[in-house]
Structures are given as structure tokens and as C-alpha cells.
Amino acid sequence: MNITVPGIPPEHQPFTGPAPGWPLVVYFHHVHPGVSHYTALSEAAFEKGLRLLLRDFAPYPAADLVTEGPIPQPTHPTVLITFDDGYRDCFDRARPLLGLYDIQAVFFVVTDRLGTRSPAPRQDFLSWDQCDALHAEGHIIAAHTRTHPRLDLLTPSAAHEEIAGSLRTVRSRYGQTRDLFAYPYGVVPETDVVPQGVLPFGTVRSRPTAWPTATGPHPVRRTYLPAGHESLWPALVTAWRRQWDGEVPDPAHEGASDSTQEDGV
């Protein structure tokens, strides 16, 4: 069963999900009806998506990501919900629904933009107080660089500092024992600039990777529920569940290998 979302390039297709036996990781940017973006949903659509995902996957216990020792492999299908950039509507609109369904998520934040306010949702970011509240509720605050650059357009040292600086900021505030990082735009530079020991996350541009083998050049793959194509969501969730069981997707739907092309976020 192959599912192609109309209007989305092959390298951005969401059909391929997790590595067999490892959590499905789904990413969002906004939960806001006024934002047009391929991972921006209204509150009603976001709740619909959560209900569909929870039909076949249990919520992944996010605390397992930041505890000492190896990350345990789940014994049953699980899903990890993630949000990129740190937009304020994720606190105002997504957070209540996460609580309703007892989901702990990962918020990958652009650390130097936190506290920035704007009437435009795409420029309106979480405050540190809001991050603290999310953390107190069991959500994970993680790094997404300091300023959200195209890392492949920077020198290796500048790219490393973008990542390391955001990791230091998050670690100093929350003291987590494992660092998590998500690449802006899904761009993975040719030079490995991720500090050793960090668990990296990509987007649909990355191939499915078992978490213990994830490295800077080969991050954990994340996928998404495509905005505006809700009729395809049930089939996508079913396909992801089969992939968790070991069904291999058609290579035509795996997208590019970890590359330096932009993921449109």
C-alpha cells in the first residue's frame, strides 16, 4: 500500500514512518487556524490527528528520552509527538489537548527567539516561563539551534556553535541527562557538527533509523500528518503501524537520504 499526498514533492512525502520496533515520531509547527503550512493544523484537526494516532499507537513516555542509560525500546507501538521552533500557539492551543490525552511531547525550541512577541503567529514565540510550565507538566524542552539557520550554509565551526549554544542553554535550565536536537529545515550538513552523545532528529528527509544507531549524519526520522489532506490520515496511520511491525515501505516513498536540501520549514 503506497500513499502519495498530492502537491507534495517525493522527498517530502510522509508515507515512510518509523524504523521497525521504534517509536513513530510525528512533528508539528503550529496549532493555529490562521497559519498556512504543511504541518500547521487547527485545534479540531490536531485533536482528530491525535485520536487517529492513539488508535494504533500508545503515547511514548517522553521522560525515557532524558533518563540515564540506554533508551529502552518499547515493547508495543508508541508515538512521540514533537513541535518545532517553539511557537506560542503550541502552548495556548496544543498544550490543553496534549493534557486531555495524557501525552508528553518534545518541544524543539530556537533558544534565542524565545520571548519574542508578535501579532503574527509565525513570529510569536514561547516565553521561558511557558517552557518552564511545559517542563513541569512532563514535556521535554529540547534544542533547535540558537537562531534557526540553514546549517549547511555556515562554516562547520559556526554550525557547531549554533547547536552547542542551544544545547547549553537548555541543559543549564533543565538539567536533562541526555541532549536532544532537531535540525532546522531538516537540513543535515555534510560535515558532522552535532556533539557526541546527542540524540538527533531529522524530518521526512531522513531515513528510518533505530534510535541507538542515530548519529549526527543519520538522525531519527520524523514524519507528519499533512495539513489539508485529512482524508489520507487514516491510511497513513495504518501504514505507519504496519511499518512498526516490520513492513518495508516502497523505496520510492522513502524520500532522499539525509541531504542538504531544505525541508520548507
Image: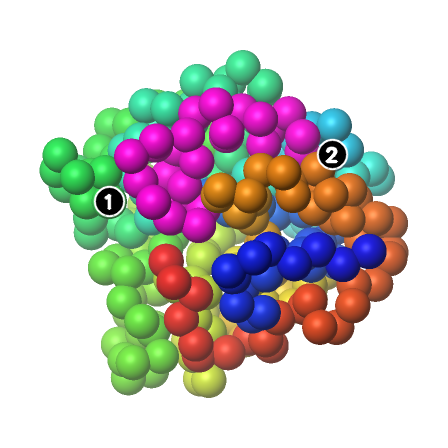
- Image-based side of 256 in relation to 116, left or right: right
- Image-based side of 257 in relation to 39, left or right: right
Identified at 82% across, 56% down, the residue is 1
Q: How many marks?
A: 2
Residue 117 position, x and y percent, is 13, 36
Three-letter amino acid code at the position of disc 2: Phe
Residue extending farthest front: 6
Marks 1/2 in contact by CB < 8 Å: the verdict is no
Callout 2 crowding tier (Cα within 10 Å): few <14, some 14–19, many ≥20: many
Q: Secondary structure at mark 2?
A: loop
Identified at 41% across, 30% down, the residue is 42
Check residue 260 for magenta coloring. Answer: no
Q: Secondary structure at mark 1?
A: helix
Does residue 63 appear in this view? no
Using the rendered view, name the quadrant where residue 121 is placed: top left
Query: Which residue matches tag 2?
Result: 57
Query: Which residue matches tag 1?
Result: 122
Q: Toward the viewer: 236 or 158?
A: 236
Q: Which residues are magenta?
A: 29-53
- Image-based side of 184 in relation to 165, left or right: right
